[in-house]
Image (tube, helix red, strand yellow):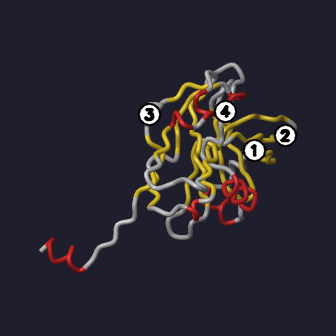
Amino acid sequence: MNTITVEKRNEQLKAKQLRRKGIVPCCIFGGSLPNSISIQVEEKTAEKLLRTQRLGSKVQLKLEGQTIITQIKDSNRCFADNKIEHIDFQALDPNTRVNSLAHVLLENADFVTGVLDKLLMEIPYSSLPEDMIDTVTVDLEGKPVGTIITVADIPEFLSDRIDLQTETDSIILRIMEKRYSSASDAEQAT
């Protein structure tokens, strides 16, 4: 789990002014917090965080000597320059189930001989914070054309400690045969 240092947001500056100074405004909400907390983080730290973590990833925030366990709930980027505009963190209560996403990462996708059809690369679920799943990896090396991988094929999703919010027979990916079009196919279509 990543740990980043944050500070309370300077309320005298508008969000646009903070961004010009290389600071990303953020917010922590939920969990056992009585009110949301406006915070700020250096832009370089925020970029590094979002490069290595995803929505639903657990992150420890150090704020004024206090450590808050959170998950990344949302982030916004500017359309024009792709800079981070805002990050929302949800504080996690160790005794309360939380909704999250597990991301499916593919290993050795270059070895697939057919067409890789990715259908469900984020799996919604709920669990206690200690049982959260950030990513699962599927190794595709040696998988033949015709392979279909469902949620039930991934052991992490069969744990009784998580509640899936999708059916276990949902298809995550399939490997289909490559189809080549020829001149005769094009003539038949007309």
What residue does disc 3 label? 169
The numbered mark, 1 or 3, whose residue comes first in the sequence reads: 1
- Image-quadrant location for residue 19: bottom right
What residue does disc 2 label? 64
Evaluate if marks 4 and 1 touch, with contact meaning CB atoms under 8 Å apart: no
Distance from Cα at disc 1 to Cα at disc 3: 45 Å
Q: Position of residue 45 (x, y in %)?
A: 75, 57
Q: Residues within 10 Å of mark 3 (few under 14, many from 20)?
A: few
Evaluate if marks 4 and 2 touch, with contact meaning CB atoms under 8 Å apart: no
Farthest right residue? 65
Amino acid type, mark 3: Asp
- Picture mark count: 4
Between 136 and 55, which is closer to the camera in this rendering? 136
Residue at position x 52%, y 33% in the image: 152
Q: Assign the C terminus to one quadrant of the image.
A: bottom left
What residue does disc 1 label? 8
What residue does disc 4 label? 132
